Image (spheres, grey):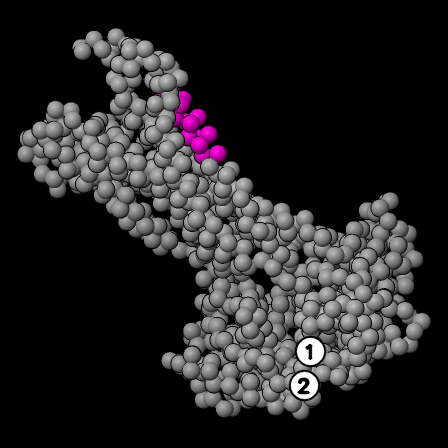
Amino acid sequence: MFKNWLKIAFINYRKNWLSTCINLLGLSLGLTAFLLVFLNWQDEKSYEKWIPEGDNVFYIERILGPKNYNSVSSYPFLDTSKKLFPEIQNFSVINYWDSSKSRLLADGRSSYATYADVSEDFFKVLPFPLVAGSYDNLFVDESSIALSEDVAKQLFGEDYKQSIGKTITKDDTGKKVVVQAIYKLPSESENTIFRPGYAMRHEGIKYDKNTWSNHGFFGFYRLKPNTNIAELENKLSALQNKELNIALKKEGWPLLQRPIQIRLVNVKEMRLESKTGGLQGVDKKAIVILLSLAGLILLLSGINFINLNTAQASQRAKEVGVRKSLGGSKKSLVFQFLVETFILYFLAFIISIVLLEYLLPFYGKFLGKTIKIGSPILYLYTFLIVVVFAFISGIIPSVYLSNFKPIETLKGNFSRSKHGIWLRNSVLTIQIIISSFFIISSLVINKQVNHMMEKDLGFNGEQVYQLDFMKDSWANDFNYRKYNLYKEKIKHFPGVIDVTGSFQTIGNGVQGSTAIKYKRDSTKYVDAGVGAIDLNFIKFYKIKFAAGRDFNPKLTSDTTRGIIVNEAFVKDIGWTNQEAVGKQMSSGTDAKAKDLEIIGVVKDFNFGDVQREVSPVMFFNYDRFWTKNALMNLQIKLTPENMDENLARIKKYWETEVEAGYPLQGEFINKTFAKTFDKYKKQQTLFSVLNIMVLTVALLGLFALSSLMIEQKLKTVVIRKTLGASDSQLIMVLTKQFLVITLVAVLISVPISYFFMNEWLKDFAFRIDMPWFPYIASLILLLILTFVVVSIKAYQATKVNLVKYLKYE
């Protein structure tokens, strides 16, 4: 029996080869798109699986207000919470970025490696396997260092395990430290953001050990198992607000206007669930949206399958009638049609796996990461998804076909069934709703991305190349002396117009902030970015003034008291631009920053991502406070003539005479800033690709469906033509039904698309008003495509042989 079912299945596949190919194509594309996005989702969820009892390790972030999140804590908050709350077993500061590196020297060898600034219990929170030495009493001061196995090998060769107790020199500061432990990093196959080449005690702890108002430490807890997280968050929030208000009152600042909430995020979920992005976050919302859209494509493929199978029902109605007349049960018929469905889905599964293996490297490269199929179990899960989906999409036409009444089908009355027409029209409507949603969404996303890219950024970064210091140190004014020395030297190179520097660099966002208040009314205050700049910075970038003036290097008052703020600063504090000029301010930036005066207000310009609002910033000459060592870059403006040659000369000088042995790190400012658009352009590209896939699947399905339905009406067409109907009248009659369905479907899709796109746009500070043209364009485009696709088959129908269809009438 099963053998006969297989024969019948392949006879039907061959007979209806067009719909079979369309089903295979649609299902393969839908499965491939879904699996690609799903693999990325699974990849993001696989981080930090290596951490023993990782379910008990949490990252700490602060909620300052609606959509206002902060990623850092004060050291006394971390230390005090550990002492007060028994649920907390250990805590550690972990300030680590994989882009930050430093050079170590030992035994005539060197290693240029990433590093983590940590506190005492680092290896209790993140227990990297110990290779040599001991973690006992490690990081109690700044004299010890722990090396990764790789760095230890680079510095000490194959006898690296014997290096415990040996001395290493930090190249940037000349400081000597003793190797106390060697640890093993997770294997390359493990997904983790924690791969420090070495770890040392954070130098800032000694300065801020008792300062509740200085938040500069990324904090992590290891909690006891089964800790009530919500309850602990409440206790931590109460501690934070109480102690911070005491500190603010003591320092002469107003109390918190809004209580701060502490939020604990499991380290395994930090990349996806952290509101601040943690140490290295991703856009979870974008991934979920793409996963949902890929799921819609899979759904669309299934709908295509249901629609085409029910449309072919009339071709198999007599088969069903004969089998039922001969004693075939409904159950056996359902099972037979399900087997046919599973065969098609299985073939689509094989095709999608082949496509997946081919496309995965390109997809990973596009996302800027390596995505691997971690385990063969994924194939099993995928196959189970296929089986479930095949059952759901196969059971509807199977039950539908098995319900035919033998007498009616043998008489040939099925094609006039209102139930069959209603089902096909309903499913076709859903298809077009999904297609319309994709078209509208794609156009809205394109307009928003283009809107951001065309925004006036408020500065002119043309021909500006930023050269970063790879060898830097805050000790002995090393950075200060290096900046001033090489600024003057580079300035005299051929093709150099000017050189400047800044603590906050364009394209990288505002990285550090401080509180600043109006001296006459302490309730007027704002948290502002620390805008330590060289005095020529504003003129260098042609930043425009909204009020006041630029710094005058000849005026002592400007270089000791004067500050310039941006419009966002003025808006937050509640003044007009003109009112702000001349106001006396006091800042927590430095002990010497208690007597400041606003001398100018610049128009808002973007330091970073244009998705976010421009942050308040106060600008001042870098050399008056602790920030004198914070300028660790040269921003060089070049003439357009011979720019490549002149830049190559600067690079060669830098690599050979300034930072020999260090990799050169530099980039044009405009290119750096352009990277802030990368994720939106990738979303735009992915959405466009998905949109093309949706339209392809939907239109091919529409073509096959219209072909089958028009074939069922050929006798009607012939009769109308015999009675004198023109070709154009016949084409209009045959396409009218599909055009009406398209019109209704697009109208239904409008409020759905508006809701979801409006929610997506809410995340952008600089956003478009919801445009009307995507909705009109979707309607016109789908009506045209529907008419073209259906009219092709309709036109062919008008050219049929009249005698062939009327000779028995």
Q: Are circles 2 and 1 on residues that touch, CB within 8 Å?
A: yes
**Residue 146 in which image quadrant:** bottom right
Q: Amino acid at mark 1?
A: Tyr
Q: Is residue 380 above or below residue 438?
A: below
Residue 448 relative to residue 498: left or right = left
The answer to whether 542 appears left or right of 268 in the picture is right
Looking at the image, residue 795 sits to the left or right of residue 603; the answer is left
Is 121 magenta? The answer is no
Relative image position of residue 594 (x, y in whole percent): 78, 83
- The residue under label 2 is 253
User: Is residue 46 in view from this perspective?
Assistant: yes
Disc 2 residue type? Trp
Q: Nearer the viewer, residue 475 or 795?
A: 795
| Residue 505 occupies quadrant | bottom right
From the image, give the main secondary structure of the stretch colored magenta.
helix
Instruction: Determine the residue positioned at 40% across, 23% down.
Output: 791
Question: Which residue is labeled 1 in the image?
Answer: 525
Q: Residues within 10 Å of mark 1 (few under 14, many from 20)?
A: many
